[in-house]
Amino acid sequence: MEDLIYVAVAETHSYSGSLVSGSTRHYLITVDSEPIFFMSVKENKERGYVKEFQGEVEEHVVVISRSERPYSRRQKHIYIAKEPFKVWVRHRGYTGDRCDDYDKIVTAQAVKASELHSFLKQFNL
């Protein structure tokens, strides 16, 4: 029987200009972690809502788009591990007249190693 790997794909977006700025961070957390989004990452850890994933992780980054003026970069991060995990995607930004902060959780999917390529096709990778 073929071993399973756990794969998560999460996007980042960084940008800056005269009235805009923003960036995305990823935090790899355990599957039993349940972050409270209005709290900081530090507060979540201190209160036990979030535990850092301690397993070994392989990361690959694919640049989706980029420009220099204004600066903007979109990337997809592919995380691969031998154990289940989640990615807390935390974006903080401001685009002129509005805040575009968001948080979301991406749960790693169990995939057979031989099926990784076809799994990634759904993300246009």
Image (tube, grey):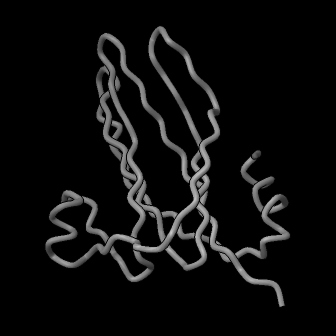
Q: Residue furthest bottom?
A: 1
Q: Which residue is found at the position 21% from the left and 68% from the top?
A: 44
Residue 99 picture quarter: top left
For the image, the number of numbered tags is 0
x and y, in percent, of residue 18 in the image: 31, 10
Q: Nearest the camera: 81 or 25?
A: 81
x and y, in percent, of residue 117 in the image: 82, 58
* Quarter of the image where the N terminus is located: bottom right
Left/right placement of residue 47 relative to residue 66 reads left
x and y, in percent, of residue 121 in the image: 80, 53
Q: Residue furthest front?
A: 56
Q: Nearest the camera: 37 or 23?
A: 23
Residue 79 picture quarter: bottom right
Q: Which residue is found at the position 47% from the left and 74% from the top?
A: 55
Left/right placement of residue 83 relative to residue 121 reads left
From what the image shows, is residue 19 above or below residue 63?
Answer: above
Left/right placement of residue 77 relative to residue 39 reads right
From what the image shows, is residue 5 above or below residue 64?
Answer: below
Q: Which residue is found at the position 37% from the left and 44% from the top?
A: 91
Q: Which residue is found at the position 53% from the left and 64% from the top?
A: 57
Left/right placement of residue 70 relative to residue 81 reads left
Q: Nearest the camera: 117 or 93?
A: 117
